[in-house]
Amino acid sequence: VYYLLIIVVGPLAPRIVDRFGGLGWLVGFGSLLSSLGLVFFYNWRSIWAVVLAVVIMGMSHAMTKAPQIALALELSRREIETAGQNVVLSFLRILERVGSIAGLLFSAMMVHIYGYETTIGITGFMVCGAAIFFLLFFMIIRKQSLAYAKG
C-alpha cells in the first residue's frame, strides 16, 4: 500500500505546487501529515490504525520526497553557482544518509528506554514540532524575500 500510494500520489505533488505556489508549503504540510501518521499509530491499537498510518505515511512521503530535492536546489542557488549542482546534490544525499543512521540509532535508544508505542508517539510529536517550525521559518523567509523583491 505504501509504495502504491507513492506511485499514485507522487505525480500529483508538482500539480499541488503549481496550484498553491511554493515547494516549502508542500514539504511542510507533507511533514505535518507524516507526523499525523505516527500519532495515529501511537493512539490506536488495531490493525486499522496500522493501515491508516501506512496510508498517511505513504501519501505524505509521496508529497514530500521530490519537492524536498527541488526545494534544496532552490535554496542553495549560490552554492550551486560556486560548487556545482552535482556537489550540492551529493552533499544532500550524504546528509540524508547520516540523518537516517542517526535517526535509527536515536529511535533504538528511545525504544530501549520508553518502549515501541511511546517512541512512536514521541517521534510523531517531534516531527510535528519540526514541521511547524519549518513552516513558520518558511513563512518568515518568504515574507522577507517578497518584501526585498518589492524594494
Image (cartoon, helix red, strand yellow):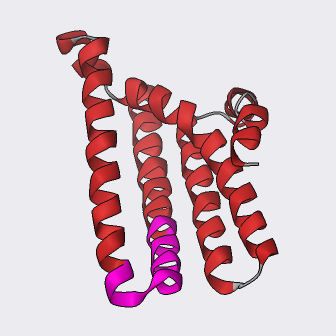
142, 93: nearer the viewer: 93
- Position of residue 124 measured from the top left corner of the image (x, y, whole percent): 52, 71
Look at the picture and state if 4 lies above or below 135. above
**Residue at image location 23% in from the left, 21% down from the top:** 79
22, 110: nearer the viewer: 110
**Residue at image location 65% in from the left, 59% down from the top:** 33
- Position of residue 99 measured from the top left corner of the image (x, y, whole percent): 30, 50
**Residue at image location 61% in from the left, 53% down from the top:** 29
Look at the picture and state if 18 lies above or below 85. below
Left or right, residue 1 beside residue 29: right
Look at the picture and state if 62 lies above or below 58. above
Look at the picture and state if 104 lies above or below 64. below
Q: Which residues are magenta?
A: 111-128
Residue most extreme to the left: 82
> What is the magenta segment's predominant secondary structure?
helix
Left or right, residue 127 beside residue 2: left
Q: Quadrant of residue 15?
A: top right
Residue most extreme to the bottom: 114
Left or right, residue 39 beside residue 69: right
- Position of residue 14 measured from the top left corner of the image (x, y, whole percent): 68, 27
- Total numbered labels: 0
**Residue at image location 70% in from the left, 59% down from the top:** 54
134, 124: nearer the viewer: 124
Quadrant location, the C terminus: top left
Instruction: Tell me if residue 125 is in the magenta stretch.
Output: yes
Left or right, residue 121 beside residue 30: left
